[in-house]
Image: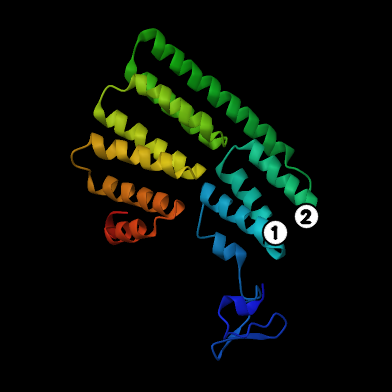
Amino acid sequence: MNSDDFGGSASMSRTGASDEYHGTMFAKPTLEQFSLSQYLGEYQGRVKIRRALYLGERCPELSIESYHIALDEIKSSTTDINLYESVFKSLEQLGGAAASDAGWVGSARKTNNSAYDLLSAELNKAKQQHIKKDGLRAQEGLAQHKVRLGNLNEALRTLQDARDYCSSIDDQVNLALTSAWISQMMGKWLQVNSYVQRVVSTLSTLPPKMAAEIKVLQIQADFGEGRWSAVVNNVRGLVYDEI
C-alpha cells in the first residue's frame, strides 16, 4: 500500500520538512514545544498514571520521562506495589531506572496489611453483631482498599458481596454507581452500561449531579464501544454546571 491508496491526489512526503495535502503545506509535528510534565500535570491519581503509561508505551522519545512521572504518581496517590514494580521493570529495560525505592515499598506493604486487617476485623464484628450498616461500610472500605492496590476484579467481587448488607434503595444505588466507575477503570464498557441501567431503573428521578455522573459514564461506555451517534446525543444532553 502506498500514499495514493489514501486519496490519490495527496502527495505525502516521509522525508521532507513538511507534507503537502491538497496543495496546503503542513509542518511536521515535533516534540520540541511539548511539555510532558505540564500536560500530565492536568491530571492526578489513576488517570494520570494511565495517561503516562499510555504515552510511555507508544512514544519512545517520551518513555523514560513518562515512566518516571508514573512512578512518582503511584508513590504519591496509591499503595499499589505490583504496579510500581511493573513500571520500574519497564524503566530498567530502557536503562532509565535508578535504585528501587525499597523504603516506599516496605511502607506501602505495611500500610496495606494494616488496612486489610482493620477492615476485616470491622467486617467480622459487624457479622457477629448482625449490624448491616457497619457491614456495608466495612465491605465498601475493603473494595476501596483493593482499588488502591489495583485489584479491580476483587474490588468488584467485594461490592457484589456488599449487596447482602444493603438496607435501603440508596445503598443499592451507591454500590451500583461505584461498581460502574470501577468497571470504567477496567475498560469493561458492557459492565458500565449494566450498572448504569441498574441505577436508572432503581430511581424514578435522578438527582441532578448523579444524572450528570450517569451521563458521563454512558458517554465513556458508548465511546468505548464505538457507538458514535449515542456519544453525540449524550454529550448534547450534558448539563456542564452539574459535572
Identify residue type, mark 2. Gly
Residue 121, above or below 240: above
Quadrant the N terminus occupies: bottom right
Kindly report the distance in space between the C-alpha atoms of the residues bearing marks 1 and 2: 9 Å
Give coordinates of residue 10: x percent, y percent. 58, 84
The kind of secondary structure element at disc 1 is helix
Identify residue type, mark 1. Ser
Give coordinates of residue 112: x percent, y percent. 59, 29
Q: Residue at x 24, y 34 (%)?
A: 202
In front: label 1 or label 2: 1
* Residue picked out by circle 1: 63
Q: Residue at x 22, y 43 (%)?
A: 206
In which quadrant of the rendered view does residue 207 lie?
Answer: top left
Q: Residues within 10 Å of mark 1 (few under 14, many from 20)?
A: many
Q: Are marks 1 and 2 in contact (CB under 8 Å)?
A: yes
Q: Residue at x 73, y 82 (%)?
A: 15
Residue at the limit of the structure toward the right, as seen here: 95
Residue at the limit of the structure toward the left, as seen here: 204
The kind of secondary structure element at disc 2 is loop
Which sits in the foreground, 240 or 203?
203
Q: Residue at x 71, y 37 (%)?
A: 103
* Residue picked out by circle 2: 96
Residue 79, above or below 137: below
Give coordinates of residue 5: x percent, y percent. 60, 76
Q: Earlier in the sequence, mark 1 or mark 2?
A: 1
